[in-house]
């Protein structure tokens, strides 16, 4: 760390501790970086990419003076923080943005603790590195004890400008996919799976005009995957003494990449998801969707290096770091597993949907009520032979199936446990838990071929805002009619993910919805104002999978009407 | 995301090409949503030498567009130049307004200027898109100023041998509704072209290729079919 950062950091820490009202000066600027062998410009905060970690304390009132030293407008969004809507940092919704040369002062009181992050919300600036961690210490002290505390920000860096990436996707949506099925795969399937199954498979995908290898829109072809701003070669290292307990705060700050994270040789105890304490779960691997956070505890006992291995979901690359007793050590890096395929089952062929159509209608039975998971739980399909995994009510199951299947190299008898959403149980009972007052069905729609993404068949520019009444509890039913994952982020309010745990349902700011899946979340409309709601994949958000949500007081709602 | 204040857009504009430019380039809105951004595309689909022992041609098939997801302005040009005779066998330029009418389909309407073999102005109406099973499809009808009705139908498919080595079978059929005496055109299929091109994508945007075309031509004067080798490149940006 540079001296200036250290100084700023110490200052921040001191002011936070002394006054319980920290003032933080953040300057958004540019810096030359070389992450791939070519020099490029990254966006930085106070000279650093990722941006400096902000350490706050629950109950503190923070003042953040954000100065824009770019030649274009910028903004900072405090991801996962509950705050007044005009402090949320979304240009065009919460405020006009920060023009070049100007300073915007954010001020809000922290009523929560945990691991969060902050990032730019203008012109895809998070893809250029404008993101950093937020750690809020609980007022009553941490529940867990640990010896060391590290923040692990995963991200995807491209030497290409994000606007250029988007332009390429608009012109050829499979531009970055170099893992497509070839003629030879077709013949291999013919001999392996038989003519009937192979033809049925190819015809089904052909009819939909979709590609089952389309796991990620933007891949390792252009991305270098980073840990705390460092490539696998640079090998970011966290030190430990054998026997110590380490807290790793994983933040997925990537623009487009879901990661599957494991540390071979270590069990990871998941203690927090999206900043909220959960009943600890011990796993070998977890998937972290874009913009999610997971806090895990690990206890390395041996005097050796351990690889932190975060494979891109499409296996086109990985972000890597090392846990080591000394600097300069490296652990053996696991091989990338074969890329998975989206299955026809995941695509919900049984639902009779008209895939690919921007204006498709879904059959009414998909608008299920409070406990309508059954029809959409794909878990049973490929997981029957994996008794060690609890996949019932598992909205996160489908792809882990592939991960499991790929684990042929694991020693026999070693149960490789992968975290699913079904494992998440809030550590505390939600006092405000109750049956929702009403349901809003949000179909996640789009056309990969044209690279248009939408909700209920409409892009942001074509849609009216979603209106909620202050105080009501609304069930959002997400029906993913596309073949991509969509990590949905609601600003300002929580999404209580219904995984059957009732008042202990996990409380999240990002809920990933997999291809063909239906997921229910309950939203307490407890924050008046105008909020953003969108897929956190930056190119999906920019091409239309975005809504404004207005939470109105009952009296103002009557006035506005249409 | 930099959303503007105006969430309304004109989705029901009259598709006349005079108005197309206005539609494509926006109706004077101050802040555009990024989901309505304008992109520009130019593709040299075929840019090649084509020939056999008797004939040596340079052939081009170039198209481009500017516009948003739903409204685009297309430019297309196709033609060939015969080296040994120093003449253009066929050459045209189309200007089309294109509207996204279904998920994978655009309807197109506009004008064509044919330079060779005869200078005419035609009106064009067509459809272009991706048919089920990944067939790139293009169909257009041309009505010339003399009232002649002509048609063109193109179909292409891609077979991946590797991630970069791609075989593209392709068919193009040109038809005429009537005999056109002064152009020597005979009613029916005037030209049938079926070929295979094997390209290597050095990058997605640039791929040299080799291949062959089987060409059958029918006119009032003659019927001939030839097989020609092709070599060229495909490029877009």
Image (cartoon, rainbow, N blue to C red):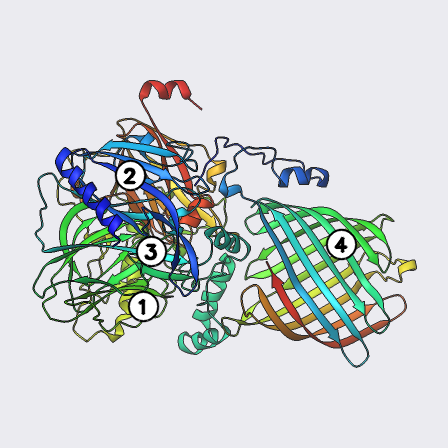
The image shows residue B177 at horizontal and vertical percentages of 81, 56
* Label 2 secondary element: strand
**Residue A369 showing in the rendered view:** no
Q: Dot 3 falls on which chain?
A: A
On the same chain: label 3 and label 4? Answer: no
Dot 3 corresponds to which residue? A155
Q: Are marks 3 and 2 in contact (CB under 8 Å)?
A: no
Task: Determine the CA span between mark 2 and mark 1.
Answer: 32 Å
Residue that numbered label 1 is attached to: A233
Quadrant of the image for the N terminus of chain A?
bottom left
Q: How many residues crowd mark 3 within 10 Å: few (<14), some (14–19), many (20+)? A: many
Task: Determine whether A32 is above or below B28 in the image.
Answer: below
Question: Is B20 situated left or right of A387 in this image?
Answer: right
Q: Position of residue A369 (x, y in %)?
A: 29, 40
- Residue drawn at the location 65% of the way across and 75% of the way down: B210
Nearer mark to the viewer, of 2 and 1: 2
Q: Nearer the viewer, residue B30 or B74?
A: B30
Chain at numbered mark 1: A
Q: Residues within 10 Å of mark 1 (few under 14, many from 20)?
A: few
Q: Residue furthest right?
A: B182
Q: Which residue is mark 4?
A: B93
Residue at mark 2: A25
- Looking at the rendering, which quadrant does residue A542 occupy? top left
């Amino acid at each position: 760390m540079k001296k200036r950062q250290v100084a700023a950091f110490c200052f921040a820490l001191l002011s936070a501790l002394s006054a319980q009202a920290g003032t933080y000066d953040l300057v958004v600027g540019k810096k030359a970086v070389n992450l791939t062998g070519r020099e490029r410009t990254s966006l930085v905060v106070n000279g650093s990419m990722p941006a400096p970690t902000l350490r706050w304390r629950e109950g503190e009132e923070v003042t953040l003076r954000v100065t824009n030293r770019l030649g274009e407008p910028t903004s900072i969004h405090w991801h996962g923080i509950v705050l007044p809507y005009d402090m949320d940092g979304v240009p065009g919704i919460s405020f006009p943005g920060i023009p070049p040369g100007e300073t915007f002062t954010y001020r809000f009181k922290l009523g929560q603790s945990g691991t969060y992050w902050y990032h730019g919300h203008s012109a895809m600036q998070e893809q250029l590195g404008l993101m950093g961690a937020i750690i809020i210490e609980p007022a009553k002290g941490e529940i867990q004890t640990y010896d060391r505390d590290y923040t692990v920000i995963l991200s995807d860096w491209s030497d290409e400008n994000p606007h250029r990436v988007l332009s390429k996707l608009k012109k050829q949506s499979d531009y970055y996919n170099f893992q497509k099925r070839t003629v030879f795969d077709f013949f291999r399937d013919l001999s392996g799976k038989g003519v009937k199954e192979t033809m049925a498979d190819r015809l089904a995908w052909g009819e939909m005009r979709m590609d089952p290898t389309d796991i990620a829109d933007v891949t390792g072809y252009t991305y270098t995957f980073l840990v705390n701003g460092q490539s696998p070669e640079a090998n970011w290292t966290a030190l430990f003494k054998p026997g110590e307990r380490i807290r790793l705060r994983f933040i997925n700050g990537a623009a487009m990449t879901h990661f599957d994270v494991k540390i071979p040789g270590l069990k990871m105890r998941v203690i927090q998801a999206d900043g909220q304490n959960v009943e600890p779960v011990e796993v070998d691997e977890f998937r972290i969707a874009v913009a999610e956070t997971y806090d895990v505890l690990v206890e390395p006992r041996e005097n050796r290096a351990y690889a932190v291995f975060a494979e891109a979901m499409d296996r086109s690359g990985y972000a890597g770091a090392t846990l080591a007793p000394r600097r300069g050590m490296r652990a053996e890096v696991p091989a990338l597993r074969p890329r998975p395929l989206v299955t026809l089952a995941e695509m919900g062929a049984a639902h009779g949907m008209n895939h690919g159509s921007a204006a498709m209608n879904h059959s009414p039975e998909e608008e299920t009520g409070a406990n309508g998971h059954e029809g959409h739980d794909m878990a049973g399909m490929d997981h029957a032979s994996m008794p060690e995994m609890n996949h019932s009510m598992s909205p996160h199951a489908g792809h882990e199936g592939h991960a499991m299947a790929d684990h042929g190299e694991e020693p026999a008898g070693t149960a490789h446990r992968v975290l699913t959403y079904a494992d998440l149980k809030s550590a505390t009972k939600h006092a405000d838990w109750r049956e929702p007052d009403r349901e809003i069905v949000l179909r996640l729609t789009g056309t990969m071929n044209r690279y248009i993404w939408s909700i209920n068949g409409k892009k942001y520019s074509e849609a009216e805002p979603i209106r909620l009444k202050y105080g009501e509890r609304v069930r959002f039913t997400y029906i993913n009619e596309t073949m991509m994952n969509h990590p949905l982020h609601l600003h300002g309010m929580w999404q209580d993910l219904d995984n059957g745990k009732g008042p202990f349902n996990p409380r999240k700011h990002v809920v990933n919805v997999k291809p063909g899946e239906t997921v229910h979340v309950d939203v307490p409309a407890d924050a008046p104002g105008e909020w953003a709601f969108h897929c956190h994949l930056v190119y999906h958000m920019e091409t239309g999978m975005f809504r404004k949500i207005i939470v109105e007081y009952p009296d103002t709602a009557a006035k506005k009407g249409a | 995301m930099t959303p503007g204040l105006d969430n309304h857009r004109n989705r029901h504009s009259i598709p006349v090409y005079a108005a197309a430019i206005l539609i494509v380039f926006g109706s004077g809105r101050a802040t555009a949503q990024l989901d309505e951004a304008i992109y520009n595309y130019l593709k040299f689909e075929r840019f090649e030498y084509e020939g056999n022992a008797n004939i040596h041609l340079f052939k081009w098939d170039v198209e481009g567009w500017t516009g948003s997801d739903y409204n685009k302005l297309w430019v297309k040009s196709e033609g060939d130049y015969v080296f040994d005779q120093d003449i253009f066998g066929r050459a045209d330029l189309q200007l089309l307004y294109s509207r996204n009418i279904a998920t994978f389909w655009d309807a197109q309407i506009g004008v064509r200027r044919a330079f060779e073999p005869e200078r005419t102005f035609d009106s064009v109406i067509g459809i272009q898109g991706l048919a089920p099973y990944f067939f790139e499809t293009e169909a257009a009808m041309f009505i010339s100023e003399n009232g002649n009705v002509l048609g063109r139908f193109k179909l292409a498919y891609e077979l991946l041998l590797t991630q970069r080595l791609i075989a593209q079978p392709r068919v193009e059929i040109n038809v005429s509704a009537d005999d056109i005496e002064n152009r020597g055109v005979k009613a029916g299929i005037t030209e049938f072209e079926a070929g295979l091109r094997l390209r290597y994508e050095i990058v997605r945007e640039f791929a040299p290729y080799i291949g062959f075309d089987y060409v059958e031509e029918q006119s009032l004067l003659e019927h001939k079919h030839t097989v020609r080798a092709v070599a060229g490149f495909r490029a877009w940006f």
